[in-house]
Image: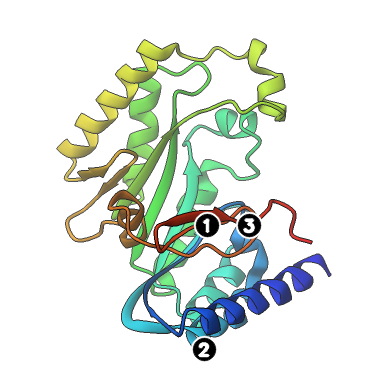
Amino acid sequence: EQLNSYTKGLISQIKAWGGRLCRPLVDTVYFGGGTPSLLGERIIPIIGAVKAAFAVSDGAALTLEINPAGNSDNILSAAKKAGVTRLSIGAQSGNNEILSLLGRTHKAEDTLNTVKAARKMGFDNISLDLMIGLHDSDLSTLKADLDFVLSAEPYHISAYILKTEKNTLFYKKRDSLNLPDEDETAEQYLYMCRYLEEKGFSHYEISNFAKEGKEGKHNLKYWHCEEYLGIGPSAHSFLEGERFYYPRDSR
């Protein structure tokens, strides 16, 4: 019921913005933040609403973030029907103990199975997320995670340094964690940059690496300070020189 209500509200806002902005040309659509793949087949009418409210260009990049937990066939099938062209899969690590510590509900093999299933359904443009600066991590564990991600042969990798946010379960257990200090984390970051570049990835943005021609078009909009519209709880926008955002509460 909550998902249906959320979807209805989101579509209503999409329609409202489409009318207000007089159907401007859209060349990227990005479903991110939280776990948008939980919407399942609801992404079909949502993307349909985007295409009805805005002029979506031919060849537009339509990206969906998904978590690789459980059976991914349903969300992948829905994404294909909806016209999604790019997937961003939250691998995070290739170490099952670390995934459990991070509160992730998937295992390393789920990531590889999700990539395999996605390619079987015709998805070619796949990005994987990776976290660095993790518990008990050093250059050897980082290399193992990098090799794990590379074994899936993605065209794009997004790598983020772990940040313990206040008022989260992970923050509460921080004293029991063996996290690298700032210098060690910086060393991991620089090692990762060199290693991925050696493997043929261009370091085109602080946290993003891509094979030639596979840079994230949506990422580049932020990097180049171009305009973008965000719809949904906590979504931020930058239009006509102004930055604004939706409140966190979806009600």
Residue drawn 20% across and 30% down? 194
Residue wearing tag 3: 246
Circle 1 crowding by C-alpha within 10 Å: few under 14, some 14–19, many from 20: some
The CA distance from mark 2 to mark 1 is: 21 Å
First-in-chain label (3 vs 2):
2
Residue drawn 32% across and 26% down? 189
Residue wearing tag 2: 52
Foreground mark, 1 or 3, reads 3
The one of 5 and 67 positioned closer to us in this rendering:
5
Q: Position of residue 28 (x, y in %)?
A: 38, 69
Q: Secondary structure at mark 2?
A: helix
Horizontal relation, residue 134 to residue 210: left or right:
right
Q: Tell me the quarter of the picture where residue 226 sits.
A: bottom left
Q: Is residue 217 above or below residue 90?
A: below
Residue drawn 34% across and 46% down? 157
Q: Position of residue 42 (x, y in %)?
A: 65, 76
Colour option used: rainbow
First-in-chain label (2 vs 1):
1
Which amino acid type is shown beneath numbered disc 1?
Gly
Horizontal relation, residue 38 to residue 82: left or right:
right
Residue drawn 60% across and 14% down? 177
